[in-house]
Image: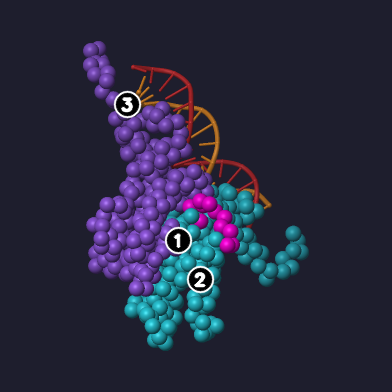
Chain colours: A cyan, B purple, C orange, D red
Amino acid sequence: MAQAQEKPDLPQREVKRKAILTAAVEVFLGAGFGLASMDAIAQRAGVSKATVYSHFGNKQKLFGAIIKALCHDLFTPLQTSETGANNLELTLRRIAEHFLCLIMDAQILALYRVVIAESCRFPEFAHIFYENGPGQTAENFAPYLCKQTELGHLDIADPRRAAEQFFSLLSGHVHTRALLGVESHIEAGEMDKHITSAVATFLRAYRPHS
Amino acid sequence: MAQAQEKPDLPQREVKRKAILTAAVEVFLGAGFGLASMDAIAQRAGVSKATVYSHFGNKQKLFGAIIKALCHDLFTPLQTSETGANNLELTLRRIAEHFLCLIMDAQILALYRVVIAESCRFPEFAHIFYENGPGQTAENFAPYLCKQTELGHLDIADPRRAAEQFFSLLSGHVHTRALLGVESHIEAGEMDKHITSAVATFLRAYRPHS
DNA sequence: GTCTATAATTGGATAGAC
DNA sequence: GTCTATCCAATTATAGAC
């Protein structure tokens, strides 16, 4: 106590802040906003409740902090540019696989559930989620479809709408079931068929009739 | 008080039971399971809390009762049989319109949000929701696609999968945004374009190449 | 059978010691 | 800056009057 303070620059406070955020993610995503308790978060973070409040003010603000952070961190943008270039079907398939890894990710599913559940009480977070997730995804993919149309490999009049259709085909009932926790595990073979079928349907619909 | 009891057969108890159920639907769908209170339900039903407990035992059981009732009542099956018969595109469009009315219905959206939110704590209800909703819908539609394939109007190898793709195209980001409460109102013209585009994409993908 | 009143617990938030 | 102890409101559930 006397000669402590040796490393005033070691961010002791930041360590606790991180611990609280990590705990809050687990508790909020597991229990939802309503049933999550600040006690549970403090306990899991290994700090006192007062410390939690000193960092984040109140429950709503803490909730907002973790939702925004997750929306910002979890959605890694799909790489549509600089691809294997010439093979359209293969490129679509690669994008499809990445997309399905994203939307079937346990943490993103949990985030989606919580954001949907609280969309009436916290419309701001629903908006942020949509813009960073589904919105961005379609927005980024549309230019690729546009270019492929210019090159004559596709025949698409409304690229943005076609992009949404592509991802809707991919989400499908597989995603619905995952969101509902019904028949939660899907074997690799079934997933492969699902992707193959979605890509094939999209290509049959939008390939030029030679 | 003395000469009351004139109509012992009037189902006074049933009236209160109905009032409680109605109130419970509003409160649970509005607030979610966690933030819904038995006080609020009793108050809205115009009865005392003790009466609520005497009818439904506890909060979980009351929640289960209303979820099951809603899953049973809200999903009206799409009429795929005995249609305008010969015009395939028109029939698909009619089914599509009915389907979109269903999934954009405010009460079904609210039910969906609550069921998703509680899918971890109440997997049984998620299962019932899926079976009565998305599952039934695709299951009932598949035979129609099968028959159209036999008639040579469509070319579908896996009718069940194609059925899911049809409804996935129709749900799309329109449904996602509605679920999230983002950009909640959609004008009729935009909805019409959405349906037209989804049906057209499905037909281009699955019509036989003459 | 329904109500009023209350028990028992929990959860959000804070005051004050160190 | 962090912890302990506590306040206060709300909530589930029930006991007992009528």
The amino acid type found where label 2 is placed reads Ala
Crowd rating for badge 3 (residues with CA inside 10 Å; few <14, some 14–19, many 20+):
few
Please, is residue A94 above or below residue A127 in the view?
Answer: below
From the top left corner, tell me how far across and down residue B103 is, in percent: 34, 55
Q: Residues within 10 Å of mark 2 (few under 14, many from 20)?
A: many
Q: CA distance from mark 3 to mark 2?
A: 56 Å
* Magenta-highlighted residues: A178-189
Considering depth in this image, is A207 or B33 the residue closer to the camera? Answer: A207
Same chain check for tags 3 and 2? no
Give the spatial CA distance, label 3 vs label 1: 51 Å
Give the amino acid at mark 1. Answer: Asp
Residue annotated with mark 3: B13
Q: Amino acid at mark 3?
A: Arg
Position of the N terminus of chain A, as image quadrant, is bottom right
Q: Nearer the viewer, residue B160 or A202?
A: B160
Q: Where does label 1 land, which residue?
A: B158
- Ranked by sequence position, the earlier of labels 3 and 1 is 3
Circle 1 crowding by C-alpha within 10 Å: few under 14, some 14–19, many from 20:
few
Q: Are marks 3 and 1 on the same chain?
A: yes
Closer to viewer: mark 3 or mark 2: 2
User: Could you tell me which residue is drawn at 44 percent across and 76 percent down?
Assistant: A141
Residue lying at the far top of the rendered structure: B2
* Chain ID at mark 1: B
Q: Which mark is residue A96?
A: 2
Q: Are marks 1 and 2 on the same chain?
A: no
Between the residue at mark 1 and the residue at mark 2, the CA separation in whole angstroms equals 20 Å
- Image location of residue B77, percent across then percent down: 33, 49
Residue placed at 26% from the left, 57% from the top?
Answer: B85
| Residue B50 numbered mark, or none | none
Q: Position of residue D8 (x, y in %)?
A: 46, 41
Depth check, front residue: B84 or A169: B84
